Amino acid sequence: MPRRAGSLTEKAWSFDAPERIGAEMIGIPAGEKIAFDLRLESVSEGILVTGTLGGHAEGQCSRCLDPIDQDISVFLTELFVYPDSETDRTAEEDEEVERIVDEKIDLEQIVIDAIATDLPLSPLCTDDCPGLCPECGVKLADAEPDHGHDIIDPRWAKLADRMDETGGEK
């Protein structure tokens, strides 16, 4: 691979996700296409990869559990350093530096991390999703406007049994 600063390659392609990418509530399913629109540029320290990743995520709303389908687009910027470059020599042991190995760059973990960190941990079907009733589990968006439950504190339950509708003794 030539080490000329300024060499440039632009590439757009798609690839099937080998496994599900994302969080428990939402992710790109295995086998779903991930679109890459990347620019690979030779810089003095290595190969600078910039561009976007896109795909179709599926999951469920964290409040009402309705299915969610959404297209995602993630911007990616990553430097893969040449072996024995200044960045490679001065990188600390615990510092995460992507390296060019055998004149190849491995984008797999970078893509997984970029998509997974961009997806919400608690996705919502709508910003104002009311969720489910904590007492009966009915979807509150579909419930009657006056939906509610008369809940009596168990410590007062015996007293409530003794009182009638008007507040007098039984």
Image: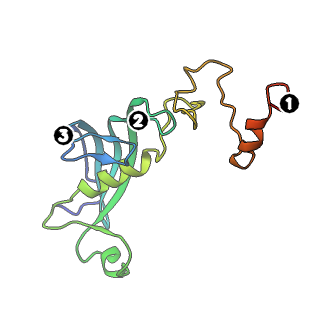
Q: Residue furthest front?
A: 170
For the residue labelled by badge 3, is the local secondary structure a helix, a strand or a loop?
A: strand
The quadrant of the image that shows the N terminus is: bottom left
Q: Which circle, 2 or 1, is nearer the viewer?
A: 1
Q: Which numbered disc, 2 or 3, marks the residue that appears first in the sequence?
A: 3
Where is residue 30 drawn, in percent x and y?
21, 41
Q: Mark 3 highlights which residue?
A: 16
Residue 69 lies left or right of residue 124; in this view the side is: left
Residue at 77% x, 36% y: name it: 162
Residue type at mark 3? Asp
How far apart are the alpha carbons under marks 2 and 3?
A: 22 Å
Which numbered mark, 1 or 3, is in the foreground of this view? 1
Name the residue: 85% across, 30% down: 167
**Image height of 94 relative to 97, above or below:** below
Q: Which residue is mark 1?
A: 167
The reply to whether residue 107 is visible in this rendering is no
The three-letter amino acid code for the residue at tag 1 is Gly
Horizontal side, residue 71 vs residue 164: left or right: left
Q: Which SS class for mark 2?
A: strand
Q: Tag 2: residue type?
A: Gln
| Furthest-left residue in this view | 102
Closer to the camera, 57 or 168?
168
Q: Which residue is mark 2?
A: 60
Quadrant of the rendering where the C terminus is positioned: top right
